[in-house]
Amino acid sequence: MYMIHCYKLNGYNIVLDVASGSIHSVDDVAYDLIRAYENLDNHDIDGHQSALTKQMLSTYETLTEKDIMDLISDVEALKSQGKLFSSDTYGDIADSNKKYELTALCMNVSHACNMSCAYCFAGKGEYGGGEGGSNKGVPSANLMNLETAKRAIDFLVEQSGNKSNLDVDFFGGEPLLNWQLVKDTVKYARSIESKCNKKFRFTLTTNGLLIDDDVIDFANKEIYNVVLSLDGRPEINDAMRKMPSSGGSYSEVVDKFKKIVEARRGKGYYMRGTFTHDNMDFLNDILHMANLGYKELSMEPVVTKGDDPLGFSMDDLPGLYKEYETLAVEMLEREKNGEGFSFYHYTLDLSGGPCVHKRIAGCGVGTEYLAVTPSGELYPCHQFVGDTSFLMGDVRSGLTNNRLRDEFAACSIYSREECRDCWARFYCSGGCAANAYNDSGSINGVSEFYCELFKKRIECAIMMNVARQVSL
């Protein structure tokens, strides 16, 4: 199947050849000519050259027939080079693309939280049980113990096959409520690295309330990436990210975030925010964090179920599109002024990027990536935790739900009908299985809203790459 995607953004005419990934920035004439090619049978010029030339000359009266013929020759050259109207040949390998080697664990070391965020997908961080506050008084069942943590690390090693690089994300709830367990788990994993021929990379996702010098020092030594949760402007953050007493959390965490980021001196971190229907002007929240000096930013649309008023509808898309487009232009302008920052969804490696397997199948949910609860239960990812229909086993008995594992392994851009005809399929890799399940009732479905939002972000990211190349 041949497919291109043409769009105009920020003064650029952009043509994406979907299968090859080739991106072309063209003038108006070439743009219209390529669009006209889309309407030809099999995009084949044979028998249509005269009519196509006449059509173009009627639109661009200052051009000559030779000008159009030269452009047609250029398009044909790109076709022969596999850079335009190229054929998608990856579908043939999708069925043989199943991977069962585990490479990453999300360790929910705490099913308790010391915040009460309005939009929390995990039931205020407690996944249906527990209580907030400090780790004092948190039921032990809601905190992972060291035996379970060690067994989870051993399970990851056992299931990783020949993979040598393994990822572990300390998650919750709030993982700092179980901070000693985090440190002990890292120590254990490091102690077995050499004999197992493995290398562990750790991530910590935290709301920041319990960050202190010990957390900062240990994170700088052992944690590859720290994800810090802040929703932007004080009034926006405090409306969503509340303390158990109902007070806002901004003033409690902002100085701690600044301290840990400065101490990391360029080591991996992300300021990660969530925006809801209440702050559809989320650009202002991103810029607020950038103005605080943070360079690595992420702002995610809220994940909701049903008719939650914090969630979005298809009617909200035009306004959100505008926010993303304005963000892209603002980022380019700040880059020119030496004030640039990174936005997670606009980070796009056009020269390398993910391997074919990742482009087809995505994050590896349920196969290469699993979530572990405090008791050791295994789920496809953190967003499925607590839904027993997605329970896959536990770290002691291993994977027992092979049917579910096979179902996740079969998910790809070719198993989803909606993806087959989508120009963005090699960038989103089929999208988030949890979002698809929430919206369609099937992990092989799609979430139309999140699909549309993703496509806009990719358009913006490609445009930014084009703009940087043009300015060189």
Image (cartoon, rainbow, N blue to C red):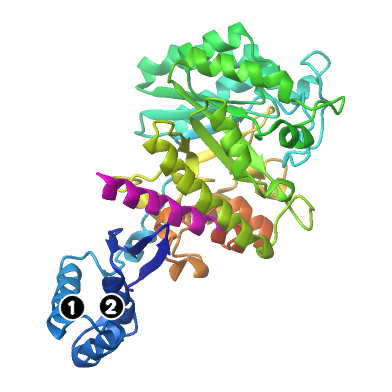
Left/right placement of residue 201 relative to residue 402 reads: left
Q: Count neighbours of disc 2 (C-alpha within 10 A) and say few if under 14, some if 14 to 19, many if 20 or more.
A: some
Q: Secondary structure at mark 2?
A: helix
Which residue is drawn at the image coordinates 76% and 16% (left, top)?
Answer: 135
Q: Amino acid at mark 1?
A: Ile
- Quarter of the rendering occupied by the C terminus: top left
Q: Residue 265 in the image: state x and y as whole percent.
A: 44, 16
Extreme right residue here?
245
User: In the figure, 373 relative to 406: above or below?
Assistant: above
Q: Secondary structure at mark 1?
A: helix
Per the image, is 469 magenta? yes
Return the residue at label 2.
33
- What is the three-letter code of the residue carrying label 2? Leu
User: Which label was assigned to residue 393?
Assistant: none
The residue located at (54%, 49%) in the rendering is: 405
Question: Badge 1 is on which residue?
Answer: 72
Looking at this view, is 215 or 245 the one in front? Answer: 245
User: Looking at the image, can residue 442 be seen?
Assistant: no
Residue 344 drawn at (x, y percent)? 48, 40
Residue 92 sits inside the magenta stretch? no
The reply to whether discs 2 and 1 touch (Cβ–Cβ < 8 Å) is yes
Q: Characterize the magenta stretch by its predominant secondary structure.
A: helix
